[in-house]
Image (cartoon, rainbow, N blue to C red):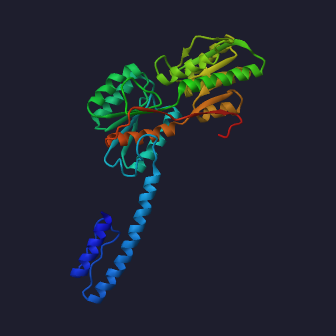
Amino acid sequence: MRKKAISMILAAALGSALLAGCSSAPKETTAAATTAETTAEEKKEESKAEETKAEEKKEEAAGNDMLSGETGDIAKAGDGKGQKVVLITIDSMDQHWVNMDKGCKKAAEELGCDYKWIAPDVKDDAKQIECVNNAVAGGYDAIMVAANGPDAISSALQEAKDQGIKIVYVDSPANVEAEATFSTDNKAAGTTAGEEMKKALEDAGITSGKIGIINVNAATDSCVNREEGFRAAFDGTDFEIMETQYGEGDAAKSQSIAENYITQGVVGIFGCNEGSTTGAGNAIKAAGNADIIGVGFDKSDAILNLIDDGYLLCTMAQNPDVMGSEGVKAAVKAINGEELGGEVTDTGVSVITKDSDK
């Protein structure tokens, strides 16, 4: 279309001594009074038009290479123009969600969609449901959500879906069928965490003892699967996995739980999320007992410092930025009518230790 517009402009100039530019051209040119001046201007405009076309081809190629989603066709720059996408996370305090928001913003800027992040100040089902209702009232076309309580939030999400709003899960799904899901394979990652702890204990000559688990709650899908995977790593061993305690993802509450575990003589503590892991590491540090093996989930400055100082063995680092960016791409595709088939994408996890390149 742009090539045709430029050709028509040039043809009109040749025929009428008046050259008019279209909005996509870099400049408008007015014909001079004399034929000689008109011819000179036309040649100049032809040269500019050729430069413009070359630049447009470069920009188009860059736009096509800019975004390559894992589901369906490539998402292109401008595909999200005029569309409204919202991210609703479990809370707003974890660095995990901040990093997810960064990934969302990057993709939203590239695609040209209107993006916003909203979240409860604490992990609370009622507050998260209120966020969903506010998103519906705000006229958003797609909701990306990390569900705190899958059962609790599903009714609100279903109502949103019934109104034509596209649902995409990031990190933690609910029970409503979504366009796509981007998350860690949490059970497998939990098993990896368990294997790391078990190896460290065995390397220290410890083949039995109590191990404590600090989880967020008994409902959040991602954390429940992590715990399940972790427990599986100790099947058939002489280690005793103690009853799980819940700290609501709060570092201070989790530290108190970990301190109680330590008084009971545990040899290891597993934290299922960022706050749980930070609390466990702080408790081990406060006890001055670096022999207790602390293993956790997520990557934050506090967790990395605890690893470097020797109070945590390692953490399972997810890729929340990837969840966010791929989630936005999927949301835009779904709004544009592309069928994504509810595909679940594992965004990966890596084990970070003191010796890792952080």
Residue sitting at the far left: 16
Give the answer, above or below, for where 110 lies relative to 53.
above
Quarter of the image where the C terminus is located: top right
27 left or right, relative to 198 = left
Say which of 144 and 116 sits in front: 144
Name the foreground residue: 352 vs 309.
352
Q: Is residue 196 above or below residue 266?
A: below
Report the side of 265 relative to 248 (left or right).
Answer: right
Task: Name the quarter where the N terminus is drawn.
Answer: bottom left
Determine the image quadrant of residue 266.
top right
Q: Position of residue 319 (x, y in %)?
A: 54, 36
Inspect this view and state whether residue 104 appears.
yes
| Tally of numbered tags | 0
Return the x and y of residue 95 as percentages of the image width and height: 53, 35
Relative to 6, is 300 on the left or the right? right
Q: Residue furthest right?
A: 205
Up-down relation of residue 132 to residue 329 (above or below): above
Q: Residue at x 44, y 28 (%)?
A: 90
Q: Position of residue 80 (x, y in %)?
A: 35, 47
Q: Residue at 32% x, 25% y: name it.
A: 156
Residue at 28 percent across and 68 percent down: it is: 5
Q: Nearer the viewer, residue 180 or 204?
A: 180
**The image quarter in which residue 339 lies:** top left
